[in-house]
Image: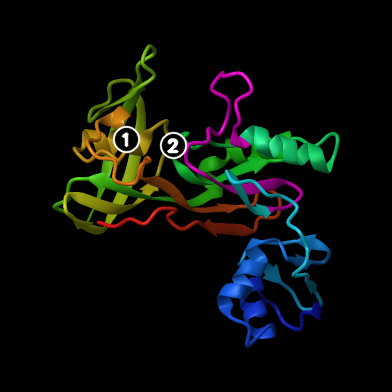
Amino acid sequence: MKLTVKYDSPLLEYLYSALAPQSRSSIKSLLTHSKISVGGRVVTAYDYRLHAGDSVEINANRKPEFENRNVKIIYEDQWLIVIDKRHGLPTVSTGRENETTAYSILFSYMQSKAADGRVFIVHRLDRDTSGLIVFAKDEQTKRLLQENWNECVLERKYLGVCEGNFSRESGKIISWLTENPKSLKMSSSPYDNGGSKAVTRYNVIEQRKGLSLLEIELETGRKNQIRVQLSSAGHPIAGDKKYGADTNPYGRLALHASTLSFRHPHTGKVLTFTSPLPFRAKL
């Protein structure tokens, strides 16, 4: 099925109108499973901007170009890839031989598309943290993102369940982080001790029975920042034995990178991606 767009619109909103009365969930599924292309290129982003005259093709029988249980490609263009990573998968190798990582999976994917296909790491998530990560397809894009990270990134939020209940609905944690070179464990000081300054803001979404569901926003991006700062505040992330958690209600680290919004380093367009909490946070 082919459609010629008659007005500017975000892709999902246009599809809701064009494919009515088809259910909204089934239309979202077409995008999620790479069944929609614009101008001959597969698009999965809900907010992809359509313009009058664009050609949209719906092919419910098309097989996705990429399938992997640990990595889901949320967005891809000629410069970058945004993925949703499953917990338990490292972003890059930790030194183990033949270790499967988000990087190795994407590198294989790029090689399957072109012999000179490559992928470059822009930022990382901890092995046991799930959620959104952006990778570059060339060194220039990597450099543009990394060197201008604070200017490019407009929003970076996490959802997490931590131990204990908060007396305030929102707050900001400011501390200085240092790493033990032997244990590789981070520590947090409320005073400037020569470490890296880290700033984290949080809002309490729900709390009961000794657990709290938080929306967490990073102002800085330090190693284990959320985990060590909340632990030092007396509220370790549930399932985080490394930083003192006593509970593990979900059988995993209860931390998920849920929102990533940044300005495209080449087009200047603001891209916003969201990923729902992959476990049911029953408090």
Most extreme residue toward the bottom, as rendered?
21
Give the side of residue 222 with respect to residue 101, left or right: left
Give the side of residue 32 with respect to residue 60, left or right: left
**How far is the residue under mark 1 from the one under mark 2?**
9 Å
Which quadrant: the C terminus? bottom left
Tell me the quarter of the picture where residue 24 sits.
bottom right
The residue wearing badge 1 is 240
The residue wearing badge 2 is 128
Q: In this view, does 177 lie above or below 52?
A: above
State the residue at coordinates (62%, 88%): 21
> Residue 165: where, in percent of width, then height?
17, 50
Of the pair 18 and 278, the residue shown nearer to us = 278
State the residue at coordinates (24%, 31%): 244
Give the side of residue 204 with respect to residue 160, left or right: left
Most common SS among magenta residues = loop
Q: What stretch is highlighted in magenta?
A: 76-102
Q: Is residue 77 above or below residue 106?
A: below
